[in-house]
Amino acid sequence: MTPQKWSPPVPFPTPSPSHPPPPAPAATTAQPADDLANSTKIPVGCSAPLLALNGQVAHAARHPKDYSSVAEVKFVAEITDPLTRDRKLCKIKCVEGQWIGPLCEHKDDGGRYHPILRSCLLENVPSHVVLTYRNVTIQASQLLFPHDAVLLARCRELGMYKLRGSASLQCQNGKWSDRVPHCVPTTVLTNFAPGTPPTILLSIPTGSAAVEPSGELAVFPGSIVHLECLYSRKMGTPEWSWTATHRSYLTGWAIASDERDWKYRLSIYYSKPTDSGTYTCHTPAPERATNSVAVRVAPVHCDQDRLQSRDAALSVRVEGSRLGQTAAFSCPLGYTIKGAATVTCTGSGHWSHPTPACVPIRCPALMLSDPRMRLVEVNNSYGGHAIFACTFGYTVDPRPGLMCESTGQWDRPLPRCKPILCKAMPVPKHGTVVESLPPETALRTAEAHAEMAKEPSTTTTTTTTAAPNATEEDAAKARKKDTTPRLKLPPLGVGASLRYACHDRYQLIGEPSIVCTETGHWSHPAPTCKPRCPYPGEPANGRLQPVKFAYVPGDKITVSCNVGYVAPLDGRPECRPNGTWSEPLPTCTIYSEV
């Protein structure tokens, strides 16, 4: 190709399918360039070239502004390639006052410089089409390939689809030699629809074979190959044709009862290199649809030494090293295999994939979004655990921690910090309760109640004491008394305290004050209010028997009078179940007044 002229103000080549992005010139030289044909002397006198990186004009202050005596400018450029980001030494040359280039060095041509030709863009690839480049399967579209790149096309499953279009695409200065082909489904996929290409199934009862990137079936000599053309026998008998000329091949319907009505077979017994060729199945007229399989018989062996690895954890089981045979790799527990677990000896004499490696299983880093949660212990290798803890008043939900599984993922989502609640406490009959909720306890309680399903509950009369830092509104709520009958209090958070009191004529049995602890349990059971009769006081001119602070229902008291005084003999007050005395306390009367 004729070198293109390049003159200011055209900017330096920028990233595009036609040019790679060059950095600042790396060197200048005035020697004549003997790598351009028919050029023995290069005149000087070009103006300073513009330098652009990624489409933006770059300032190269360290480079000379006067290029009148410069014959060529060399720089390092990155050439577009989907597999390797090749870096090449490139240059521009001053020829008759015009910059020519860029030209890049080709090591496979003795280091001579050649013009850069445009790359080709691979756009959407049709389904079931497999493209390979340098024996590597292309996994994505929208890729750039350099000039002269050759892509091989085949259908994903040999014989199940028929390739329509060219099996080889070559990039020619920005354009592909042909359109990307597509795959047409065959009879077994279309339920034997009329006009559909016949399906060809492959069977290798003896020997070995492998499908090449080009879609060719590579067969090791001595193998037996059966090609099954799938077609409904009641619609006619298909025909086989082949390009191999050294012998004829047996064809006919399969013998097995479950195959003889739809499998028309061609058999290659004890294959030889002379059996290489294309084998085509033709359906009967008027359809005359066809499908073909290209066969190449070659005594290919792959080097088993290339399967060896310095990775001590990697194990390999080799079936054999001849064409079509495989090698299977495995890793011990706690490792995952990076690369292909199974490789096949291909017709090129190379294994289908590089030797893989064993990589320790690692679960992803844990990102905690809850400020109340912290990691106590973490081991993100296989079988390791992550242990969490929460701030005071909260608990990890659910427990226990996480475990790193063989998939490289944690066994479940991150837990959360859930407020600890002490169960709802009953309010004693004939008693009252005073709640004390510090601000942080009130927050935990509110959070917990927001998560709980709202259930109707019966309430009891309580008086709430506001926290010292509470607002006036909170204080007003605390002073407000709920007159609705209540049987128990709602669950409360850690730090909440309950202070109990009994109504008149009732005595508190148990702890008068209890606290919600961080275990989620109250410090003491709820107390009870039992009826009690109060001490009635010492009678005048007498004494009371028995003397108690409070009397239980059923207790009776008697009055003993001092000398010279007397009390009614039938006066014995009894403590009733409601905490009242059955009668007034008898009085001691002086004898002289009786």
Image (cartoon, rainbow, N blue to C red):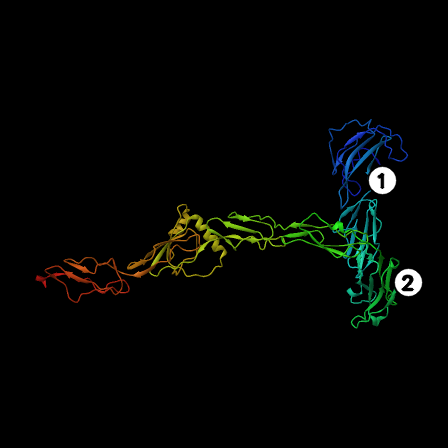
Under mark 2, the amino acid is Arg
Q: Position of residue 477 (x, y in %)?
A: 40, 51
The residue under label 1 is: 109
Residue 307 is left or right of residue 540, and the answer is right
Residue 269 to residue 317: above or below:
below
Residue 417 to residue 240: above or below:
above
Residue 501 to residue 259: above or below:
above
Under mark 1, the amino acid is Asp
Q: Residue at x 23, y 58 (%)?
A: 548
Residue at disc 2, secondary structure: loop
In depth, the one of 76 and 272 nearer the eye is 272
Q: Position of residue 201 (x, y in %)?
A: 80, 63
Residue 171 seen in render: yes
Q: Nearer the viewer, mark 2 or mark 1?
A: 2
Tell me the crowding category of disc 2: few under 14, some 14 to 19, or many 20 or more residues within 10 angstroms, Cα based: few
Residue 140 seen in render: no
Q: Quadrant of residue 565?
A: bottom left
Q: Quadrant of residue 425?
A: bottom left
Q: Gap between marks 2 and 1, in whole Å? A: 44 Å
In depth, the one of 362 and 152 nearer the eye is 362
**Furthest residue to the right?**
245
Residue 560 is left or right of residue 554, and the answer is left
The residue under label 2 is: 247
Q: Earlier in the sequence, mark 2 or mark 1?
A: 1
The C terminus, quarter of image: bottom left
Q: Position of residue 119 (x, y in %)?
A: 80, 44
